[in-house]
Amino acid sequence: MSSARPTRTPLSASSNKATPPLVLSRFLKRSVFEVIKERITKLDHDLFDVIWPAVKKLPDNRNIVQTVEEDFPGGITAPDYYVYEVFHEFLMPLIKDLHNININSELPLHPKSDFIKIQPKTSAAEPLVELNIDPNDEFVLSGAIECSRNLDGFELPLNLKVGKLETIERIITTILMQDDFTKFSEPSNPESDQKGGTYYTLNEVLEKPSEICASLASSGLLIALCDREEIDDCTRLHGRHWPYGRGVFVTEDKTVAVWINVHDHLRVLVSTPTDSPGEIGLPFSKMSFIMSYLHERLDFVWHKKLGHLSSRPTYLGAGIRFSLIVSFPGLSKDSDNMKHLCAMRGLQYRETLSANIARISNYQSLSITETNCFNDFATASSNLLHLEKDLSMQNSAHIATMLTNIFRRKRSSLADLDSPEKHPKF
């Protein structure tokens, strides 16, 4: 229920109005700064390495801005796992606020993953969860789910040398190339030698022009990326060996992309169907198959309260993010009210280049299971779409009433003309 959520202020990390500097000013008070300013993690990362997205003046480059805004919306990053303990006085309240959790509450133990187990003979092409929040295809333009994980025993990609990057790449791609991995997908072409998918190196993706990059973008599976030459802080953003040892596995049906060693070791993206973008049940079914499959074969970094650790604090806990690109022709006319409606429902609202089209996504993935996260997002986004539909119907009713009145006046005028008393006499 929205009333149970903490009140969002303009400075709250999840207020939909906050900018990284505003969030930083709220949580990095002088008293906290004085306590933590000299601390360094065991991998030599200091406070600036954590807050640089909020304080660094970025180049006027859309790729850079998009990368920082999408991956570090609170203006903070985790260059290594240890910052969560070393700078806990600063980070813990901010992380709670980012996830729509009351900052004064005690953070509970994070629940274990509860992705739906899919039996070996079951195909997620027949979804276990069937849910279309926009059955008439009126408002939702596209959608995607992302789930992030990091392998136990390895540091984050930012800190890895070439050998370790290659090892992670090999471990994950070996699993993805197995025949039984693609059971969640539509039956693949029996004559194809792609075994259900293809792996592309990040160099191939970043080529200009890049056919695979265009294909991923059209499928809703492209993540925010930037070239080394586009930012002088590329080492702080991606590490010394970028883009080597990174890549993306794409299924043959172009509905799933598994990104490797881009901020996190593993980032799985599943898109909603192009012909039914409001169908969020099918991609969640696919994600459930993929993640339960990977959980059985890999060990992931885990913290008892923060859940699955990530370089992106917004992906802590369940590490899952639901995103929809939605047309809001009515609600978007009052931007402040729209942001308030979203914040009260635990949704992040981000405007796009088009005034009435926005991207909505969940804030919370911490202290909540993946399935509860899905249910909360489905309820909140569905509620928002109902408000938009009601508003459009009210507008339609208003227009219909106005037209009826116009036609009534016209009929009256014609009647007047037909009246003998109204005809002019010559």
Image (cartoon, rainbow, N blue to C red):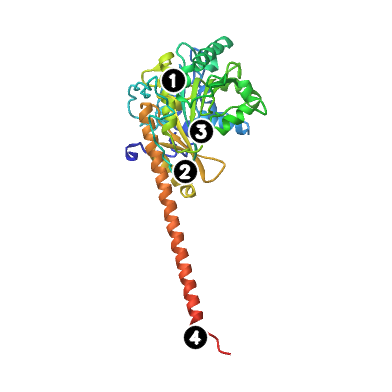
Who comes first in sequence, dot 1 or dot 2? Answer: 2
Reading the image, the residue beneath label 1 is 309
Placement of the N terminus among the 4 image quadrants: top left
Who comes first in sequence, dot 4 or dot 2? Answer: 2
| Amino acid tagged 1 | Leu
Foreground tag (3 vs 1): 1
Reading the image, the residue beneath label 4 is 420
Placement of the C terminus among the 4 image quadrants: bottom right
Local packing at callout 1 (Cα closer than 10 Å; few below 14, some 14-19, many 20+) is: many
Marks 4/1: CA distance?
A: 86 Å
Q: Residue at x 47, y 33 (%)?
A: 23
Who comes first in sequence, dot 4 or dot 1? Answer: 1
Foreground tag (1 vs 2): 2
Q: Which residue occupies the extreme top position in the image?
A: 163
Q: Above or below — where is 392 with respect to 43?
A: below
Reading the image, the residue beneath label 2 is 137
| Amino acid tagged 3 | Pro
Marks 2/3: CA distance?
A: 38 Å
Could you say whether the residue bearing mark 2 is in a helix, strand or loop?
loop
Q: Quadrant of residue 291?
A: top left
Q: Assess whether mark 3 and mark 2 are in contact (beta carbons under 8 angstroms).
A: no
For this view, does 97 lie left or right of residue 326? left
Q: Which residue occupies the extreme right position in the image?
A: 208
Q: Assess whether mark 2 and mark 4 are in contact (beta carbons under 8 angstroms).
A: no
Report x, y in % for residue 305: 36, 21
Residue 424 showing in the rendered view: yes
Could you say whether the residue bearing mark 4 is in a helix, strand or loop?
helix
Marks 4/3: CA distance?
A: 76 Å
Q: Above or below — where is 225 with respect to 349?
A: above
Report x, y in % for residue 383: 38, 42
